[in-house]
Amino acid sequence: MSNQKQQEQSLSLIRKIGYGVGDAGSNFCWTFIASFIMIYCTNTLGISAAVVGTLLMLSKVLDGITDVFMGRIIDATHSKMGKARFWYFVSSFPVAIFTFILFNVPGSFTENTKYAFIFIIYTLIGAVFYTMNNIAYSTLTALCTKNPKDRVQMGSYRFVFAGVAILFLSFCTSGLLEYFGGGQKGWRAVSFIYSIICLVLLLVPVFAVHELPEEALRETSGMDKGKDEPGFLQGIVLLLKNKYFLLILALHLVKYMGSGLTSGLGIYFATYQLGNASLLGTLSLAGILPAAVALPFVPVLTSRFGMSRTVMTSNIAGALGCIPVVIGGLTGNFTMVFIGMVLRTIASAPQTGAMTAIIAETDEYLNLKFGYRLTGMIYSCSSVGVKVGTGLGTALCGFILDFGGFDGMAEIQTARALATINWSYLLAVIVPMVLAAVLFYFLRVEEENKKMRAEMQIEK
């Protein structure tokens, strides 16, 4: 086997780590926005949570449309940097810049102008620049290696570095805001620092990984290699025929809507229910660090039991692990909440590590079943799920807060507001795990691909 072929078969550890660093950069944009945009609007700008939630929801409609278009653009791109790497590079700069702008609404604006400003900038980030960046980043997983173990490990490193960023944001943001004087002055300083960190980290994967030649990516199935690439509408039809694409899209929406709710409500839950905003960092730690410890074992589990079966079982275990979270939340026992979050996180590790590899298998299913590859459009489901799911979750936070009668300018919240925050946060922790377990029961793409390869006498 030639050196080039060996390199195509497996990526070096440093390249996998370099790829994973990019997700830390993404989180200094998207998680920062998802976790703090609502409290910035209610407690600094003094505008309505319900109105902001409605605007964010409208923005997500546009966001979902542009995701699929961006996936098609990547599939049709032929540049010296490859299909996805080019778009990932050029979009990194506006992602960082507009993150800073979003948290710097001019104080001289009227209330309606503030709403318009938030809507426009949030839409530019979500529907244009972050769409471009995140779909390209996810697509790189399938374009820089054909090794399933590499893809699982790349997904694991993504999670580890994303977790580091989320922990930093959770532990440090409140302190940094206070250090820089609070109010708009504090948000200006913090958003500037985070935007610089975001850009630097986003650029690391540009130099860490390179796409395989298109000829190598086409070597798979003995399908008609002269077949023309499908047009956009034909691509949409093929996606709708791909049952596993629809299942993965549903999984991402469920997971990240829950994530958007827990991220958006987390600061309120820690501040008003637990009485200590700094506990948000402890909750985030329980939701990340245990998975980082468990992730190295994920490739072993998926190789032995299969990706779908491993992940389905892990979600069932994760749902059971949520029971102490609910009990602790209802009784005010933070220790029990923490223990339950740790159990839930350990159980969730296989889903975190294996998801990018499962998406690649979904692209392979399309290729084996219909003779086409739509890698960019297939990976758009992850971006749709992340942004639309998180965005809808964040938007729902606004409706929930308004429904509960929350007042960002009041020193003491009503019993109804506190109960609404508490119940909503706890349900957002457990319900997505249950739904994900059900969806994974039907997600048997790995097994079906093996069966089709055997029938077609194709060696992987």
Image (cartoon, rainbow, N blue to C red):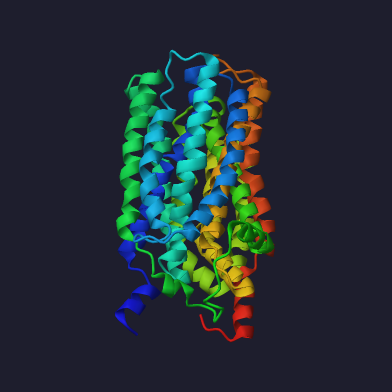
Asked if residue 453 lies left or right of residue 177, the reply is right
- What residue is rendered at 62% in x and 41% in y? 428
Q: Is residue 177 left or right of residue 319?
A: left
Image position of 443 (left or right of 178)? right
**Is residue 138 shown to the viewer in this render?**
yes
- Expressed as whole percent of the image width and height from the top left, the position of residue 179 reads 32, 24
Q: Position of residue 431 (x, y in %)?
A: 66, 46
In the image, residue 61 lies at what x, y percent?
A: 62, 39
In the foreground, 317 or 410: 410
From what the image shows, is residue 92 above or below residue 206?
A: above
Nearest to the observer: residue 88 or residue 414: 88
State the quadrant of the N terminus: bottom left
The residue depicted at 42 percent of the width and 74 percent of the height is: 216
Q: How many numbered marks, from 0 up? A: 0
Q: In the rendered view, tell whether residue 388 sits above or below residue 185.
A: below
Q: Position of residue 74 (x, y in %)?
A: 47, 57
**Residue 282 visible in rendering:** no
| Relative depth, front residue between 371 and 290 | 371
- Residue positioned 58% across, 65% down in the render: 362
Residue 326 image-quadrant placement: top right
Q: At x 47% / y 38%, what residue is drawn?
A: 125
| Front residue of this view, candidates 371 and 166 | 371
